Image (spheres, rainbow, N blue to C red):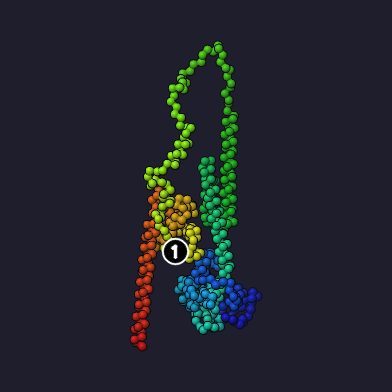
Amino acid sequence: MEFTPPFAGQDGSYRPGRRRLSAAMLEAEAELTQEPADYPARREVLGLLKSLRGALPVSAAAANTLIVMIEHTRAEDWTAMETPFVYAHNETLLNWTGVSLATLRRHIRELADARFLVAQDGRNGQRGKRWQGTESQRTGFNLASLRHRWHDLVALSRSETRRREELSFLRQEIASLNEQVRLLSDALDQPMIMAEARRLMRLRLMTSEPAKLHALHGQMATYLVALQAIQAQQETTVDNLASAAPETPNLRPMGAQNETHYTDTKNNLSLKNVVSVAACSRNRIEAMRREPLDDPGENPRLGRESALRGFKGTAQFYLGICKALREICPTATPSAEQLIDAAEYLSGQIGVSYHAWVQGCGVLGRLQAAIAVIIMASRLERQAVIHARDAYFRALVERGAQNALFLDRSLYALRDVRNREELAIGTLVETRVAADMGSTTIQGRRH
């Protein structure tokens, strides 16, 4: 919608009525007359924006407002022949987002400056209540600008994925160095270095910038080098002390004048019973390792392999029982690796530490550790109380190591809960439809 600028500022912006349009808003408005780069579906746009929450050039609250506005559009409006448009009064937008009017205006300003939407005001460019006019007088928020930002958002998603992989790699490397530093500090009695290593381990979880994690990795490596130097110095000192010990002087051999030399001990080796097992001990140990166990329940690998007890769940099943996982996954049909990566990100949100997650992956495997996190998140969504969540996850891992973890029982229970929820929602919808039809019939009879 074109406006006649009453005056123009030095930055190229002008004020039509009460809304002040910036140069970025004018560029976004001009882009609407051009062919967009792509026509993504509403599901794809929502999945990409939810995965980039916190990495967009707007605040997280403004991104949530944009996501809510997209959710209230129709899926067919995102096709090539339609335009995604939001017709809503300010009161309706406030009910959708749950924020104040000043906060809503600030969010709209951020999104418009980032060229994520174009605000088309009413008569004379005034704010106030939005109204739905004719095709040439549409008033509201035009979301077609997201089609022009699509390639930029995809590139940002790829860079964000690489950044998260780098963060995960650096945190794991710092944890590996910390294990060596902890063992050496304990052996060499260096409590100060051990305390500094613990501090670096805490900082690595609170840091989301690769440059800072590189610095933490360098500090941890420096502590490891210092401990190795102390260990080498102590070993050199011990060797010097051993070499400085007085040696036993060489004695003159006994001659015939010394007569026979007698001792109180009886060195008759023929009387000792020597059992020669050392030569074949390695072979006997290897043979014992290859022998099958009499009781299959004593196999330590059985717990890691059968925690699901044959339960086979698809990606749609896990997305259905856990709404938080659905918001993190980049697509509606994620692969197994994407599901595991989303569960790893979800573990940090529900309070499971990265060290506990690594231990769970080592004991249960990445897939079963991810399913355990999904079960915890599903229970939390259904108002379950888990006080020490990190300790709770570690307890699950310990039960898995002892062949006492039954994930299939929890999954069956969550499936039944989901079926009951869907049945209740369907019954409520049918009741409302019947009530609406009844009210329509009564009004028709009155007329």
Give the secondary structure at mark 1.
helix
- Quarter of the image with the C terminus is bottom left
x%, y% of residue 204?
53, 54
Relative to 134, is 111 above or below?
A: above
How many marks the image carries: the answer is 1
User: Where is residue 28, by image quadrant?
Assistant: bottom right
Q: Amino acid at mark 1?
A: Gln
**Residue count near mark 1 (Cα–Cα under 10 Å), binned few <14, some 14–19, many ≥20:** few
Q: Residue furthest top?
A: 257
User: Where is residue 425, by image quadrant?
Assistant: bottom left
Relative to 357, is 382 above or below?
A: below
Q: Residue furthest right?
A: 10
Q: Is residue 134 visible?
A: yes
* Near-viewer residue (162 or 21): 162
Q: Residue furthest bottom?
A: 447
Residue at 45% from the left image edge and 36% from the top image edge: 284
Residue at 57% from the left image edge and 28% from the top image edge: 245
With 282 as the anchor, is 382 left or right in this view? left
x%, y% of residue 400?
41, 51
Residue at 44% from the left image edge and 57% from the top image edge: 371
- Quarter of the image with the N terminus is bottom right
x%, y% of residue 58?
55, 68
* Near-viewer residue (420 or 89): 420
Relative to 152, is 296 above or below?
A: above
Residue at 41% from the left image edge and 52% from the top image edge: 306
Q: Dot 1 corresponds to which residue?
A: 316
x%, y% of residue 29?
59, 76
* Near-viewer residue (344 or 101): 344
Q: Is residue 385 visible?
A: no
